[in-house]
Structures are given as C-alpha cells and as structure tokens.
Amino acid sequence: MLIECVPNISEGRRHDVVAAIARAAEEIDGVRLLDCSSDESHNRSVLTMAGEAGPLGAAVLAMFDLAVRHIDLQSHTGEHPRLGAVDVVPFVPLEGATMADCVSLARETASAVAVRFGIPVFLYEAA
C-alpha cells in the first residue's frame, strides 16, 4: 500500500532548518522524499513524501520533533496564516490504499503527536 503525505511547515527562510526537517523524514526506512519547496515570503515549506503507513507516521513524528524545537511561532512572520510549526499533514491514498486507510493513519498520527509533544491537533475533512 502506498500513501502520499504532504506536510506543510511554518518555515521557509531558514534553509538549514528546512533541510534538517526534510532529512529527518528521509532517514526513515520506507519513506521517499519526493519534493521540498520553500517560499520565503510566506515563510512556509511544503514537503511531499510517499511510503507505507507505518514509516510515514514515523516520518511525521520525526519532522514534528525538529519543527517544534526549531520553529517559534511567537517570532514567526509570513504572508500565510499558520496554526502550528507543522501546519497541515494530509495523507493521500495512492497505490493500493483507500481513503479509510488515510483517515486511520491521520487519526493514529494525530494521537501520537498530541501525546508525545503535548500539543493540540485538529483533524479536518474525512479524518
């Protein structure tokens, strides 16, 4: 089963921070980083990765770990509205995966983020 994940992080100016967060995801076996695009005026980066559910969930947790330590929203400025250091984490069904698989992964990942980092997580759309 192959799922795509497109997390948005609230950092687009400090390329070393963005690279470290992308590397954290890339280092998880079974996850492939397909793209990382940053926009300085919005101060936001969008990563695109794909893999199976378990490794993708681990990659998201690794990204959160770095993002919450290195992105301070109290001093953050940018054109794009934001809610967190990691803003949105959509999961998209690709090969052999269903929307139900992605909803399950979103809920599991949200729960893990809330417990591990002690931050609120909001689910949207089908999740």
Image (cartoon, grey):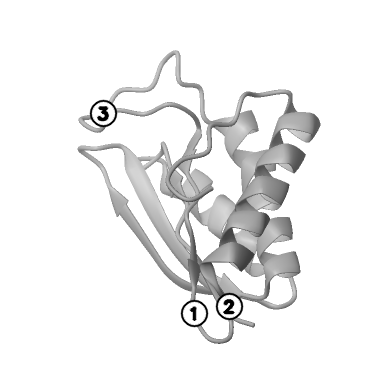
- Residue in view at x 73 percent, y 23 percent: 118
Inspect the image, locate mark 3, and give the three-letter code of the amino acid beneath it.
Gly
Residue to which mark 1 is pinned: 94
User: How many angstroms separate mark 2 from mark 3 (CA)?
Assistant: 35 Å
Q: In the displayed structure, does residue 119 sit left or right of residue 99? A: right
Which of the marked residues, 1 or 3, is nearer the chain's N terminus?
3
Mark carried by residue 78: 3
* Quadrant assignment, res 31: bottom right
Mark 2 in CB contact with mark 1 (< 8 angstroms): yes
Percent coordinates x, y for residue 86 in the rendering: 51, 39
Q: Is residue 69 above or below residue 86?
A: above
Residue 26 percent across, percent down from the top left: 62, 68
Q: What residue did someone put label 2 on?
A: 97
SS of the residue at dot 3?
Answer: loop
Closest to the camera, between mark 1 and mark 3, is: 1
| 33 vs 107, nearest the viewer | 107
Q: Residue 121 sits in which quadrant?
A: top right
Is residue 36 found left or right of 127 in the rendered image? left
Q: Please say whether residue 65 is visible from this viewpoint.
A: yes
